[in-house]
């Protein structure tokens, strides 16, 4: 179903994990692998309904991230992450906000320095992955829900404290940068495969209305 893109002020902070659960349970994944990942996240919320969205749940917690797409609809913005040493989509901890789209947009705004970003509140992708131990922080799980975020014309990015650099990449450029398969999957979902199949765009216009 088509959905509208929303600004941060149009999204309400939600403290109850039931909000995130309802969003994910109502989402139609694109394939069986994504359905399995979605089910893992829903099961985690059911297991920890009070604090699944808080980083204080040390063994694992919900996160939210965004693939920010440039105004020409041709490239996605990645951050060269200081801690993980790879080029990744923007995002981070929910910090108690169960409105996953809002958390993803908030993180994208903070990490990109780009004003006026808007988010599609329908999930684009989900991914459950392990984060290695670092300092006093043990190895733990990030149960990540990813969203599509759009930048307006004239957007200028500024790297934040957690980033070594920011860069715009086309899908065909990802093979030359250190990233992971889940990022490549995100790009395929948005921009399509080598043959152009599966993309969300029709030329330079959105298939889904803004």
Image: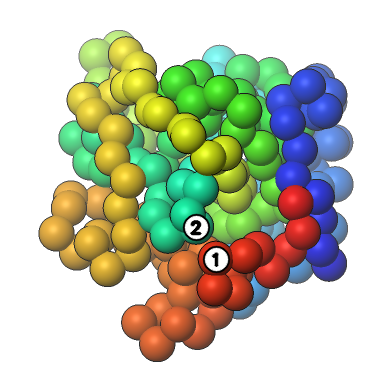
Where is residue 152, by image quadrant? top right
Structural distance between the alpha carbons of marks 2 and 1: 6 Å
Where is residue 187, by image quadrant? bottom left
User: Which percent across, then down, holds residue 49?
Assistant: 77, 31
In this view, the residue in front, 202 or 143, is 202
User: Which percent across, then down, holds residue 161?
Assistant: 32, 13
In this view, the residue in front, 89 or 42, is 89
Q: Is residue 106 above or below residue 199?
A: above
Identify the mark at residue 68; answer none if there is no mark: none
Where is residue 14, by image quadrant? top right
Task: Read off the residue under disc 1.
Answer: 204
Task: Read off the residue under disc 2.
Answer: 73
- Give the mark, 2 or 1, whose residue is nearer the N terminus: 2
User: Which residue, as the protein is rendered here, is positioned at the far left?
Assistant: 176
Residue depicted at 59% across the width and 44% down the height: 149
Dot 2, crowdedness within 10 Å: few (<14), some or many (≥20)? many
In this view, the residue in front, 54 or 209, is 209
For the N terminus, give its image quadrant.
bottom right
User: Which percent across, then down, holds residue 135?
Assistant: 24, 14
Task: Label 2: state its secondary structure.
Answer: loop
Pointer 2 with pointer 1, Cβ within 8 A: yes
Task: Label 1: state its secondary structure.
Answer: loop
**Is 19 situated left or right of 122 in this image?**
right
**Residue 89 visible, this orientation:** yes
């Amino acid at each position: 179903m088509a959905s509208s893109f929303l600004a941060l002020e149009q999204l309400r902070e939600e403290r109850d994990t039931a909000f995130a659960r309802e969003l994910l349970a109502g989402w139609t994944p694109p394939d069986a692998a994504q359905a399995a990942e979605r089910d893992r996240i829903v099961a985690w919320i059911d297991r920890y309904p009070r604090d699944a969205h808080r980083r204080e749940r040390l063994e694992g917690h919900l996160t939210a991230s965004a693939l920010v797409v440039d105004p020409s609809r041709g490239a996605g913005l990645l951050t060269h992450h200081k801690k993980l040493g790879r080029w990744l989509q923007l995002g981070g901890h929910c910090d108690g906000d169960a409105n996953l789209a809002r958390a993803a947009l908030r993180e994208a705004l903070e990490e990109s320095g780009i004003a006026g970003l808007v988010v599609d509140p329908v999930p684009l992708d989900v991914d459950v992955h392990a984060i290695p131990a670092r300092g006093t922080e043990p190895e733990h799980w990030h149960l990540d829900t990813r969203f599509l975020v759009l930048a307006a014309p004239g957007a200028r990015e500024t790297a934040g404290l957690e980033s070594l650099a920011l860069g715009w990449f086309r899908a065909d450029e990802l093979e030359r940068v250190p990233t992971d398969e889940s990022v490549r999957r995100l790009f395929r979902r948005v921009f399509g495969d080598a043959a152009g199949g599966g993309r969300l765009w029709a030329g330079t216009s959105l298939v889904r209305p803004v």
